[in-house]
Image (tube, rainbow, N blue to C red):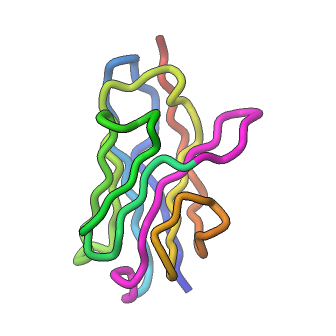
Amino acid sequence: QVQLVESGGGLAQAGGSLRLSCVASGRTFSIYAMGWFRQAPGKEREFVAAITRSSGSRSYADSVKGRFTISRDNAKNTVYLQMNRLKPEDTAVYYCAADRDGFGRNYYEYDYWGQGTQVTVSS
C-alpha cells in the first residue's frame, strides 16, 4: 500500500513557473514508476509525465515537452514536476500516481493515486 500526497499547486501567471511535489508513504517507493496526470473541468484525466524507478527514463506528453520536467528522489520518497513557461491551458488538478508494473502513459495502468493539487494559470 502506498499513500501519495501532492503539494505545490497554486496560482501562477502565464509564463511563470511552479514546482509540484508528491510524497509517498512507506519504504517501497523505489519499486514504483511514478507519473503525473492532470484533469481540467469537463475533460478526461490526461497523462503529463512519467519516470522509471531509477530515473533512467522519462516520458512526457507532447503538450508539456520542453516546458515540464519530472524528477524523483528515492531517498526522500518524493517525485517532482517542475513546470516552466506555464500556459492558461495548463490549468487543471494535477495528480501523482504510482505504477508497480510498468512505465505507463494510461491512467488505468497506475495502482495508487494522490488527492490532487490545483494549478491555475492566469493569462
Residue lying at 38% horizontally and 80% vertically, measured from the top left: 29
Residue lying at 58% horizontally and 36% vertically, measured from the top left: 92
Query: Position of 44 compared to 10: left or right?
Result: right
> Quick one: which residue is furthest to the right in this view?
42
Locate residue 19: give its quadrant.
top left
Give 90 or 10, whichever is nearer the viewer.
90
Q: Position of residue 48 (x, y in %)?
A: 48, 47
Residue lying at 33% horizontally and 55% vertically, measured from the top left: 80
Does 77 lie within the magenta span?
A: no
Q: Position of residue 59 (x, y in %)?
A: 38, 54
Q: How many marks?
A: 0
* Above-or-below relation of 45 to 52: above
Q: Position of residue 40 (x, y in %)?
A: 65, 35
Give 8 or 46, whichever is nearer the viewer.
46
* Above-or-below relation of 73 to 84: below
Locate residue 103: give its quadrant.
bottom left
Query: What segment carries the magenta color?
Result: 27-46
Q: Position of residue 36 (x, y in %)?
A: 48, 54
* Above-or-below relation of 112 to 13: below
Does 31 lie within the magenta span?
A: yes
Task: Point out the image quarter for the N terminus.
Answer: bottom right
Residue lying at 33% horizontally and 58% vertically, measured from the top left: 58
Query: Position of 109 compared to 74: left or right?
Result: right
* Above-or-below relation of 6 to 27: above
